[in-house]
Image (cartoon, coloured by chain):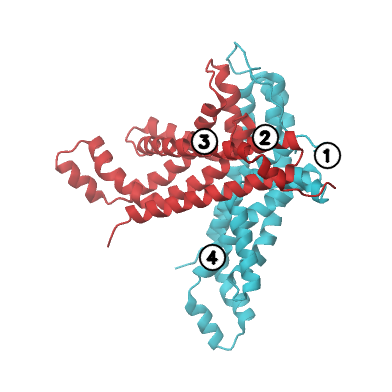
Amino acid sequence: MQGLEFSVVFENMNILLHGMFWTVVLCSSASLLSIVVAVVLAMTGISKLKPLRSATFFFLWVFRGTPLLLQLFLFYFGLPQIGLYLSPIITGIIGLTLHFGVYNADVLRAGILGVETGQHEASRSLGLSYFQTMRKVIIPQALRNVSPAVGNNLIALLKESSLVSIITVPELTLSAQRAISETFRPFEFYFAAGALYYVVNWGLEFILQRVEARTALTR
Amino acid sequence: MSGRSAGFRFIPGGTTIEETAVDYQLIIKVAPFFAKAAWSTVVVSFLSFALGLSIAFPAAFCRLSQNRFLQIPARVYVSVFRGTPCLIQLFVIYFGGPQIGIQLEPFMAGVLGLGINIGSYMTESIRGAILAVSRGQTEASRSLGLNKFQTMRKVVLPQAAGLMISPLGVNTIALIKGSSLVSAISVLELAYTAHRFTNSTYRPFEMFILASTFYLVIITLTSKAIRNLNGRFAYEK
């Protein structure tokens, strides 16, 4: 038994903060991109073309039914196999984006179907095309309706982003591991990393609350 | 680090293979190993599920209690374990444990970590279901002379049971997918097997397809079972 010594954490705090910075970068870009992916997948999921719809459902089913870890393995090892050599960070962003894009697509599809059909009819009869209707009328309303559920997914994204450490992305978890390999103090550093995740999580929840309050309908 | 090693060792840049056709023979050859690994995924998930549920029920009651000494610890438990990544929790238990005198086998550490983690989510599911039972039910049964415990056991819980199945089901599916994380502390289950065979054969697509198929089967069957159970509890109108 080694005993605990938390002062080493403070001596190596810059390593952890550096990792935390990359976690924030990683999560914010993956969050935004995942919403873009979600919009595309939600559109193809309600398309009139049956093959497109079936392909989307198959894609969603596979990505929802398999763990993120496995998907990250696929991208990390698989992309070089087809000639795409990307940095671990980009690979991590792609993995998180697709995984959470699928979750958000599910939520968003329900949101789009939840917008009154009258809205669609009205904007079509005002002369807007299908895509204009979607882009300017339906999707903004759908996004507002589903923003709490999307927010939950983004919180999950933050926590799951720790997995990309396994494909050597230098974020918070991997920084903790690096500090541990120098100091041999796993308990202290993993505990500190957990605390930092908790702080970021708090910040994210605060932002999401603000966004929800901003976009909520004033009735 | 008390001689403990992480589950993964990557060989960076080691994947340069020209062939891209799917190698079916390889899939057939390694399938038995994956089937065995799928069984351990099921075992790990089931044990963590049982542990999670046995933590979540008492925690949910504490969370709902008026007594501060019960409520606050339950609140802290839920907030901390839902607010930090499961992977970090597993690492603290497995790698950090020996430092405070708790030396667990990977399998035990994995089940413990996953169970405690999913327990915090389940606590909220159960609490939500209990709160969703209308307040009038409690008032009516109290005024009929049943005490607090009788009210909970005979009136509120039977009604809450139906309501908690689908949120607990969502937690369970998340748990099965999350069980892949224990591969990072070298528990030999599906994800770890997929990773090992990827490293030794450099055929990521085949290994991904194989492991995914097993996960998809497990998850599809589980969600079907949950839907059946939910249908049975559905309130007949």
- The subunit letter for the residue under badge 3 reads A
Circle 3: element type: helix
Q: Is residue A51 left or right of residue A13?
A: left
**Which chain gets the cyan colouring?**
B
Circle 1: element type: loop
Q: Is residue A113 left or right of residue B237?
A: left
- Distance, label 1 to label 3, CA atoms, is 33 Å
- Amino acid beneath label 4: Ala
Number of numbered discs present?
4
Read off the residue under disc 2.
B191
* Mark 1 or 4, closer to the camera: 1
- Give the mark nearer the N terminus: 2 vs 1: 1
Label drawn at residue A216: none
**Which chain gets the red colouring?**
A
In front: B22, or B182? B182
Read off the residue under disc 4.
B129
- Amino acid beneath label 2: Ala
- Distance, label 4 to label 2, CA atoms, is 33 Å
- Distance, label 4 to label 3, CA atoms, is 31 Å
Residue A179 lies in quadrant: top right
- Give the mark nearer the N terminus: 1 vs 4: 1
Quadrant into which the C terminus of chain A falls = bottom left
